[in-house]
Image (cartoon, rainbow, N blue to C red):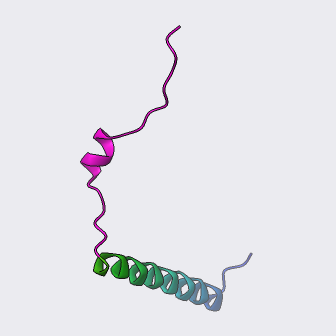
């Protein structure tokens, strides 16, 4: 694929639109009361698979 200036602009517009849509959805989640877990909580409350003792 050859990257012409028009193709680059179209790609940038497409990605910006997707990022804005993701941001809009996340803002709606936050407004509805959703609070993401902290990275520390995710690291210390992992559900590792149970490996049977040999």
User: x%, y% of residue 35?
Assistant: 28, 66
User: x%, y% of residue 37?
Assistant: 29, 56
* Residue at left offset 49%, top offset 11%: 53
Left/right of residue 32 with respect to residue 13 in the rendered view:
left
Name which quarter of the figure residue 30 lies in: bottom left
* Residue at left offset 43%, top offset 84%: 20
Nearer the observer, 11 or 37: 37
Nearer the observer, 23 or 4: 23
Nearer the observer, 8 or 26: 26
Left/right of residue 48 with respect to residue 31 in the rendered view:
right
Nearer the observer, 9 or 33: 33
Left/right of residue 5 with respect to residue 20 in the rendered view:
right
Residue range (magenta): 33-54
Q: Report if residue 22 lies within the magenta region.
A: no
Give the mark count.
Answer: 0
Q: Report if residue 39 lies within the magenta region.
A: yes
* Residue at left offset 52%, top offset 16%: 52
User: x%, y% of residue 36?
Assistant: 31, 62
Reply above or below: 13 against 32: below
User: x%, y% of residue 2?
Assistant: 72, 78
Reply above or below: 51 against 18: above
């Amino acid at each position: 694929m050859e990257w012409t200036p028009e193709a680059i602009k179209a790609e940038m517009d497409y990605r910006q639109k997707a990022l804005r849509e993701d941001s809009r959805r996340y803002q709606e989640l936050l407004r509805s009361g959703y609070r993401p877990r902290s990275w520390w909580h995710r690291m210390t409350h992992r559900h590792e698979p149970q490996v049977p003792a040999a």
